Amino acid sequence: MKLELRGITKRFGSLTANSNVSLVVNPGEIHCLLGENGAGKSTLMNILYGLITPDEGQILIDDEVVTIADPKDAVNHGIGMVHQHFMLIPVFSVADNVILGSEPVKPWPVIDYKAATTRLLELAKEYGFEIDDPNATVENLPIGAQQRVEILKALSHDASVLILDEPTAVLTPQETDAFMVILRSLKASGKSIIFITHKLREVLALADVITVMRLGEVVGVTTPAQTDERGLATMMVGRTVNFVVEKVPATPGDVVLEVRDLYVEDARGLTSVKNVSFEVRAGEILAVAGVQGNGQTELVEALTGMRHPSSGSIMLNDVNLAGQSVRHFLNAGVGHVPEDRQRYGLIPSLSISDNLVLDQLDDARFLRRFGRNLKAIKANGAKLRESFDIRSQSEEAPVGALSGGNQQKVVMARELSRELKILICSQPTRGLDVGSIEFMHRQIVDIRDSGVAVIIVSSELDEVVALGDRVAVLYDGEIQAIVPPTTSREEFGLLMAGAGAAKVTL
Amino acid sequence: MTTTEFQDPQFGTILRFAMRARQANMFIVLVLALFVGLAFGAIMIIVTQPTLLTSWSHFFHHPGGTIASSFNTVWFAYEQLFQGAVVNFHALRMLIDDPSKANLGIVLGPLSATLTYATPLIVAGLGLAIGFRSSLFNIGGQGQVILGGVLALLVGFSFHMTPVLQVALEMLAAMAGGALLAGFAGVLKAYTGAHEVIVTMMSNYTMIAVLGYLLIQPLFARPGVLDGASKAVGVTGQLPYFFSRINSSLLLNFGFVIALVAVFGVQWFFDRSKTGFELLMVGQNPDAARVAGINSRRSIIICLAFAGCLLGLAGMLELTGVDHFVTPNFGGSYGFDAITVALLGRNKPWGVFFAAIFFGAMFSGGEAMQAFTPTNIQFSLADVIQAVVVFCVATPALLVEVFHLRGGARLVSNNNTGGWV
């Protein structure tokens, strides 16, 4: 099926989200749609999927103009969409989720579960998916498997064009590899794929055609053979992007944080951080590398007071904070940029100003004799919005309305506006576009240079290497080694796979 | 739906205005909700009046007459409803014609009754709104109202102090009682995870049983009477009436001022106070609140205790402002009406205030309607109108759809019923 968007324009009030956008997707093509947050990619795809009605322009399928008024039309025309946030029912089984909305019945109204399961397994086989148990409850599956269920669901409606909205943002590196294999097999079976992302490496590895959008317009159509990461980034952002983080060598001062023999249990009672010891000095960045799920989450939770370690000590300037409350950690000068900003870092319905003081309610600056000092809170919001270039209509806008990059700026601005001894950033640039990543990295290096100790936890090896002055590799809850960032990628790979237990450098 | 289908000229005008505006905002939604409620009520009146039904069955013989008689009946009923709730036109005209002869009690009586009935409901609605804004569903309003009333009663008949002091002591006792009862549910939730809905709901039954038990105890029961009523609050413990010197039928009491203070207090609490903001944080996103160092256990307990405090106060206002003694039915449906009031007021302090007054108006207006319409249109009709209005306000999506309001999606998504899921 050939799909064409012709001259699509969509305005929201004074904002033009899509301006005369045209796009052709040929059968069996992986078409990458690349652009910064807010470039209009999602709007365009929502138009294609019938969630938004365009002001101008046409959608053509096999060279015939069609009207797509709602997602049902889209599905009937063979368009399937896998949203970034899955539209699955967590407590339903895999089979239930796939048949939801088109349940086979025999006789009405009894659902024919057997037929449903058979159909599911056939589909999975046809496209080479691994489905271990069609009756497994979706919420118990890893994210990668949940995503496969979403794709299967779209395929079960005979989709010939699949829209994938930032599918790899939630995946671990291994899951991403598995995902790419799936995409190639889908392509081989003649499906077209529209792949929205801002990870340049994936685009170059997968795409047949790349369409780059900026500020609601198509700024270029290219292929991986014609360009490289730098070229794509320049098109996306509209200027040359600095991939290498510029920083002078660290000048480490006194030890700020000293972690000794730390053991932490996860929510299920399994020990997920084992015998971890390290120290971080003022003015240096310790990066923690490792594949997601190797104890990073629990380590960060322990270092911020969210989870009490089962044993070991966390000495901040010679005071043991292990077992203390989150408030104690905050007061002691621990800054925390959590890995899931929407869930842990922000309150979407509240204003930018309020979100900028969430963990500083006790600060004398924001209190009056009776109650909160709204004037000071608003002034603080205006000031930080200005200095962190948070793009919004005003500091009173709800944070939920901001793009991911601007939301992360709010979290970062809030933490940096406190008196810090150590800043702990977990996945500081996950899901952000190139421009925002550059900005975040600059902030992190600046705070290091001002003499604060920094810990960066990231599953992106590029980021770890770019930012870290020393890199600790975590595998199965243990630190395999602490190595300099100049270590080769091969060696990092081995350490991340658990090969470093015997050897400790530095 | 077009305006011509509707018979009531006044609401026709308002509707045309609303249709022209067609912008979905809360005011329009309220007007439309009221319109739909009254339209629904009109149909109910017509189908429940045998004479009107008969005339509709001969509609094609006398279409004009049928419509006119239906219109007249509905119009008269609603006129009574309005006069019973707000102001008596006849008495008002007399007052304007000759101020010296007029009876202020009749002119202002309906408004006074409306506000009197609304007073405890305002405070109770505020209490529940606090919980809902923090995503805590306190179902125990009834129990907390009862406990507040009972403790206020104990203080009320046991002492004979200076009035101000005694009323203050009653308030204190009632608020402490409500706070303890609801706060207990908070402690259970915070430390054991017991769901507040179950605990508070059970506390209702417990308090009803406690009340029943107390009313047969010599300490509480009215001596020599077996009607289940309690002793009465002494004169020094009663809330003074504002206007009883002007006219003895104006029974609006000082509790209304207390309710107003509570509205301002709760408004301040959420807008300005640190604790209120923390409750909001925990309610909107408990995970982010935890990262920001908020002690969520403490917040849960404070929130429920504060809510219970206001519900206890509502019980005290009902007791010391209106009846001055309790019966086994004390508190009635306040605890549950207050849930609806909080919903109708969208958990905003002033919203709750006006929602409670609307409830009060439908109550006193409904009584007047039943009493003064020739065929005694039932009081329940007021309940029906009230229910339809609440239904429409609770589901703005419905109105947005039916009246094709612009910008409706925003209104629907902004539906501030956090904690109702």
Image: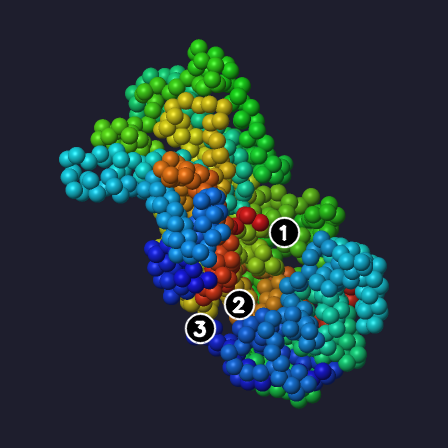
Residue B288 in sight in this render: yes
B155 or B186, nearer to the observer: B155
Q: Which marked residue is nearer to the observer: mark 1 or mark 2?
A: 2
Query: Element under label 1?
Result: helix
What's the CA distance linking mark 1 and mark 2? 26 Å
Could you confirm whether marks 1 and 2 are on the same chain? yes
A419 or B378, nearer to the observer: B378
Return the x and y of residue A498 as percentages of the image width and height.
78, 61
> Of the residues shown, which amino acid type is indicated by label 1?
Glu
Question: What residue sits 69% from the left and 60% below the top?
Answer: A88
What residue did someone put label 2 on? Answer: A403
Query: Element under label 3?
Result: loop
B231 or B8, nearer to the observer: B8
Could you confirm whether marks 3 and 2 are on the same chain? yes
Q: Earlier in the sequence, mark 1 or mark 3?
A: 3
Question: What residue sits 34% from the left and 35% below the top?
Answer: B113
Q: Is residue B196 left or right of residue B220?
A: right
Q: Is residue B82 left or right of residue A125?
A: left
What residue did someone put label 1 on? Answer: A301
Q: Earlier in the sequence, mark 1 or mark 2?
A: 1
From this view, report whether residue A454 is shown above or below residue B337: below
